[in-house]
Image: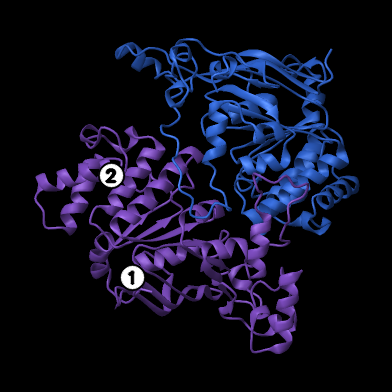
Chain colours: A purple, B blue
Amino acid sequence: MSTPLLEVRNLVVEFPSRHGTLRALDDISFSIAPGEILGVVGESGAGKSLTGAAIIGLLEPPGRVAGGQILLDGQRIDQLSNDQMRHIRGRKIGAIFQDPLTSLNPLYTVGRQLTETIQAHLPVNAAEARRRAIGLLQDTGIPAAEQRIDHFPHQFSGGMRQRVVIALALAAEPKLIVADEPTTALDVSIQAQIIQLLKRICKERGAAVMLITHDMGVIAETCDRVAVLYAGRVAEMGPVHEVIHQPAHPYTVGLMAAIPDIEVDRERLNQIDGAMPRLNAIPRGCAYNPRCPRVFDRCLQERPDLIDAGATRAACWLHDAHDPHEKTAVVQGARA
Amino acid sequence: MSSALVEVRDLAKTFDVSPPWLNRVLERKPRQLLNAVDGVSFEIQRGKTLALVGESGCGKSTVARLMVGLYAPTRGDMLFDNREAHAEFKTPAGRTLRRRIQMIFQDPYASLNPRWIVEDIIGEPLREHGILQAGPALKQRVGELLQSVGLSPLDMSKYPHQFSGGQRQRISIARALATQPEFLVCDEPTSALDVSVQAQVLNIMKDLQRQQKLTYLFISHNLAVVRHVADEVGVMYLGRLVEVADKNKLFAEPQHPYTRMLLDAIPQMKHTGRQRTPVQGEVPNPLNPPTGCTFHPRCPHANARCKTERPPLQMLRGVKVACHAVEEGRI
């Protein structure tokens, strides 16, 4: 395994409020290798976008990194000033957000936005920057890039706009791309095009991608590894195929079963009863315990960390190898 | 006389999106019309679910609004229980008709009044239609409705913000069921919800349909959800139906090239790391739709006839499909 490009260690993000401090991300650790696509998946409020925002250094105050480290290329970036961070954003980390219309300035042509970004980060003259901008637009599959570069964002369709945003994120050749729900605002046929584009770019440029989405189908087709978030913690992490087909955490199991399958006709969907806890009411022990069908005493008392669980790692006491009693429970569960 | 509860004939809705009058005069800009729904026809049998799918801008939500009378059609009509619905909506008898047709909206955050408690929200249609007056009987009925969607009668004194997204959508369902309708129009009822919660809502909708013999028009862009809830599926593209088929038939043997494309474009969980060639192109501007078959610029099977002649929706290979290539047996 090569050295990771991005390493997040025990990240904690807190929001101070009148009613006490809310812990939105609690002890999150993962890493991404160059050329790898890590999927971060979870339901709304699980903390996936917040993880992305913490890495790019765009946490909305009063949210703050209250613990842990974020390392990019071996260097800590979680304690940098806004000014220092601005040089890293764009140059080393590219960001793609959900809504392509709000991530572009409606008053400037896409060409101006691209050349500005290129010149801000790379020592090139205007003509060279423009040439690169056209190259980027061609790379992201925009037809007639030489003409389109002088158009304004509103003259592009949703899918084309998202391509422009991707071109913008790639402008300074960053090594890491954080893509937060890049296809959620798009129709399925366009979504497939954008996923294809992200995969190709990642391969060609050797960039690492952190893909945040709630769509398991997108994760399955795009990512190498996946981290499943629940209530601000990593519930399960592992290679994408294993997490989807042999999930170890009861939450992942429930989540996979709840997704309607286009090829299977079932009378009833498997549902997970209840909802994710609010931040101010996260239960003691494992946060999933009120909804978990396999809950036992220890889950109510102790909070599990990620434990080896076959092909993946899961934060679930069912997989604790040091407890012989529970180990038998796992074997039974696997056969059931 | 047909046996269908709902029968739609050549329904169309045109919106006037012209520039303001002064601009038209000064800048000599022409009037501009947008054919949001351009002649759709379908039937829904009592107790069944028809799902309409399509990408954004294809007119599926406009159909939903036409069905409940929020829009008046430009052309065509809808027969509800063999009565002309849109003519009746304008008469006093229309009130009874509206009671029998209800709607569930997409966004459970926007469709519930944040200043009202749940009792008022669910009780409003009962009071409005004069079914029950405020009092213990109304409370009792609201409690029953809450229970039917898996909430507690004690929840009726809470405000919408005290509920999660899935619970709010259940409140919308309870409100829609208050007048004991026969026909429910559901416009993307689960697309604002997370998957685990979506499963809860879809299961409740199916249970209610079975218990109360409800008929659904289910609008969605998610084909996997449609596969789960529908009996019959209509695929829309630029304001027209391009294929209407029995659910199993549509998913097993899609006929229209657009349906095939849609089915192929869905990311699937079992295909980890799949390589594929996505379909090129985008939905054209509905203000300036292509001639002939509106799908021809993106269609791999298009020929000269497709560019000039608009294919009608006709019975081919056991399904209704609007495609020259299917008719000529080219695909």
For the N terminus of chain A, the quadrant is bottom left
**Residue at horizontal 73 percent and vertical 61 percent from the top:** A273
Residue placed most toward the observer, A176 or B182: A176
Chain for numbered disc 2: A
In this rendering, position of residue A236 left or right of residue A336: left
**Residue at horizontal 66 percent and vertical 76 percent from the top:** A283
Label 1 – label 2 distance at C-alpha: 24 Å
Pointer 2 residue: A139
In this rendering, position of residue A158 left or right of residue A221: left
Chain for numbered disc 1: A
The picture places residue B244, in percent across and down from the top left corner, at 66, 25
For the C terminus of chain A, the quadrant is bottom right
Residue placed most toward the observer, A200 or A32: A200
Chain-order first, disc 1 or disc 2 = 1
Q: Is residue B81 visible?
A: yes
**Residue at horizontal 68 percent and vertical 79 percent from the top:** A318
Helix or strand or loop: what does disc 2 sit on?
A: helix
Q: Please, is residue B8 above or below residue B235 in the view?
A: above
The picture places residue B123, in percent across and down from the top left corner, at 79, 43
Helix or strand or loop: what does disc 1 sit on?
A: loop
Residue placed most toward the observer, A224 or A114: A224
The amino acid type of the residue labelled 1 equals Leu
Q: How many marks?
A: 2
Pointer 1 residue: A5
Q: Is residue B160 visible?
A: no
The amino acid type of the residue labelled 2 equals Asp
The picture places residue B163, in percent across and down from the top left corner, at 68, 57
In this rendering, position of residue A306 left or right of residue A118: right
Q: Residues within 10 Å of mark 2 (few under 14, many from 20)?
A: some
